[in-house]
Every structure is written in structure tokens, then in C-alpha cells.
Image: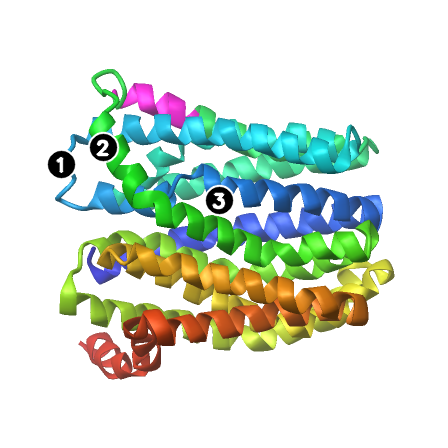
Amino acid sequence: MKMPHLIRSSAWLFMDRCFRIGVGFLVGVVIARHYGPAAYGQLAYVVAMASLLGSLANVGLDEIAPRDLAAKDRGVSLPDLQKTAIVLRLFAEALAYVLLLGFMLATQGFTLVFWLSAIYGGYFLLQSTDILEYRLRVDGEYGAIARLRSSASLLSSLAKLTAIYCDLPLIWIAVAMVIEYALATAWYIRMLHRRNWWSDARFNIGYAQNVLRRSGFLIVTGFLAALQVRVDSVMIEHFLGWESLGQYSAALKIMELFDTGAIVLSIVLVPEFARKTGAELTPLARRAYLAGISLYLISIPVMFLVWYLFPHVYGQSYSQGQAVMPYLFIRPLFILMGFLRTGLAVAEGRYTALPFYALCGCILSATLGWPLIPEYGLRGAAMASMASLLISNIAMDLLLYRRHLGWILTCPLEIGGLLQRARS
């Protein structure tokens, strides 16, 4: 992909992400203020557990499918690849839904949390068509993706606001959340038939086996990575209760606004990583980190502004959330590292190293959080979470992937070349 096309693609995705995250954040604030910290904590817990099991349900296809769709060495026709990936994803998503309900029933019983999970978890059954989004990314149709996702998000948000305006129970918020996924799925199914991407396609058992063989480490990595960033929520609920979890979730939600740059960069660059081999990958990796770190540095003053405005946004009942925020300021940087490292490791075929990062982070989060949360409350949870990210990322790079750490440290070397290109 040429640089102007890359910039246009990034712009589309960045605008879409900013719109969806911004609208989602504003509606989330209304939900938090209307239902209160305890109910907001319950909703956040359901979303966290669903995301954790969702990391298993993608069967590594979030990383593998874009790579295979973009690469020239697929060894299988494009229609067969798409159909095989969709079927695999649908089966895994259905299994994840059953596991979510089983977990909630065992730990919460037939409470509101279980019924929230039963409704919100329905999105598992709607995500298999995301494979078609990966196809559109590879074909460069970022504008279509952005318009679809933004429209679905807007309609879902309007449904949430309607539920709040009518003072409906919290369970209707879960219904409104699923609407976003349902609309996107309906559009992709319509596109599937309109472009005749399904009629001649066959399920390729050989490719399915190949995906499962390659995805083993990615599945474990995704689950452990999701567990690493959510284990603090589980411990907060255990030690401090729903209201404290609602406070923490509000602070975490506002910090997720700053993950936008990392998400957009990874979506655009993962297919590009797949097209590079050997020494060709180095300049692209450096430029990716140069762009990501620059975005992070620019966002730091904005983080302080958001921290200052926090009680005005969420209200005085969420004052504990404001106290936690400064401890979370380094989070976007390590989220960036995680996204780009995964894409680069997949491009180089270094799957086996990835689970150790998340495993190290999980162990550290649990080990540090167990004493710190009872002692320091929400600040202890944030300290444990950020310390685990810092130590696991740097230590594992030194032990297992020094080439990746080298790209991060040498990314400023690309400044001169980029300036020269800009002049010409």
C-alpha cells in the first residue's frame, strides 16, 4: 500500500474510531450517572467477562485472517478461505457463549448479572462475519467499513439513550448494546450475497486444520492478554464490591479513549507487515512505532485535562475514579506495544513467543493485586495492573524478542527519512 493510500485509510479508520469511542464514551457517562456506580460495575463486569471469553472465540483469526487474505501464499482460493474462516469463527463463538453462561450461572446464579450476560453475550453469535471486514480491509475499502461501524454505533447509542429516557431497567441497555453487532452482521450478510462471495465457496478442511495449528499460541496469548487486563476487575469485585468496580471501570473507560491510535495503526499495518519479509520489515516496524509513540506523547497533556474534568463528567459519586486515573497514564503506551508486537510476530512467524508475555503479565497482576487491592483499594489495583504491563513487556522482549525491542529503541532513526520524503 502506497503512503497516500495508507494515510487515507488511517484517516477513515481514525475518524470512525474517534466517532464510535466518543459517542460510546458520552453515552457510557449517561449510563453511569443514571444507574449509579453499583449497576455500572455489574454491567462492566459482564462486558469484561464476555471480552475475556471472546478472546478464545476469535480462534486467532483476528491476526491470521488479515495476513492470509493479504498474502500471496494462501494455498487456498479466496472464497474457500472466507467460508472456512466464518464457519470456524461461528463454532468458536457459540462455544464461548455457552461458557459465558456457565461461568455466570456458577458464580452469580440466576441474578441480574446472569441475565445481562445472556443478552449481551448474544453478540458472540453475530461476530463471525467480521471475516468479511478483514477482506474489505485488504481490498482497501476502509470508507465502507467506517460508515457501517459508525452508523451501527450511532443507532445502538440512540437505543441506549431511549432506554434511559424511558427509565427502563438496566437489562435494556444490554439489548441496545447487541443492536450494534446485529446491524453490522445484517449488512455483511447482504454484501456476501450481493457480491456472490458464498455460493461457490466450500469449507476447506485442510485450511481449517492449518488455521487451528497456527492459532494455538495466538488463542492462548489472546486469552492470557485479556485476562491480564481484566484480572484486576475480578479481584476488585471480590475484595471491594460492585460499587468500587463501577468507579474503577469509569476511570478505565475514559483511558480507553487513548487506545484509538494503537487500534487504528494495528488495523492498517498488520496487512502491510504480512507483505514484508526480512530486512524489509525493519523500516516499516520503526515507522509504526515512531507514529504510535508520537501519538502517545501528544496525548499526555490531554490525559491531564481529562483527569481534571473527570468529576464534572461522571459526577461527584465517582470521585474515587479520578484518584485512580494518573496510575493508568502509561496504559495506552503498552496497549500500543501489544498490538504492534502481535502483528509483527505473526508476520515473522514467531507465534511461540507471544503467550509468555501475557502469562508473565497475568502472574504479576494476580501476585501484586492480591496484597495491594485490600491494602490500597482501587489505587492498589491500578498499581498492580500497570506494574505488570511494564515488567512483562520489557522483560519478555529482552528474553524472547530483542529484535522487537530494537525496533522500538531505534524508531527515531526514521525521522530523517520521513522528513526527506515530506519535502519531496
Q: Are marks 2 and 3 in contact (CB under 8 Å)?
A: no
Callout 2 crowding tier (Cα within 10 Å): few <14, some 14–19, many ≥20 = some
Question: Which span of residues is magenta-colored?
Answer: 187-196
Residue 258 appears in the rendering: no
Tag 3: amino acid: Ser
Residue annotated with mark 1: 75
Q: Is residue 71 left or right of residue 61?
A: left
Q: Are marks 1 and 2 in contact (CB under 8 Å)?
A: yes
- Image position, residue 271 (x, y; %): 26, 51
Q: Quadrant of the C terminus?
A: bottom left
Q: Residue at x 77, y 52 (%)?
A: 238
Name which residue type carries label 2: Tyr
Q: Answer with the quarter of the image where residue 198 lies.
A: top left
Viewer-side residue, 48 vs 26: 48
What is the CA distance from the residue labelled 1 to the residue labelled 3? 27 Å
Q: CA distance from mark 2 to mark 3?
A: 21 Å
Q: Is residue 360 left or right of residue 205?
A: right
Checking the image for residue 180, the label placed there is none
Whole-angstrom CA distance, mark 1 to mark 2, is: 8 Å
Is residue 14 or residue 43 the one in the foreground? Answer: 43
**Was residue 188 drawn as part of the magenta stretch in this picture?**
yes
In terms of image quadrants, where is residue 158?
Answer: top right
Residue 207 - label = 2
Residue sitting nearer the eye, 163 or 283: 283
Q: Main secondary structure of the magenta part?
A: helix
Mark 1: amino acid: Gly
For the point 50% across and 29% down, the residue is 95
Residue 55: mark in rendering: 3
Q: Secondary structure at mark 2?
A: helix
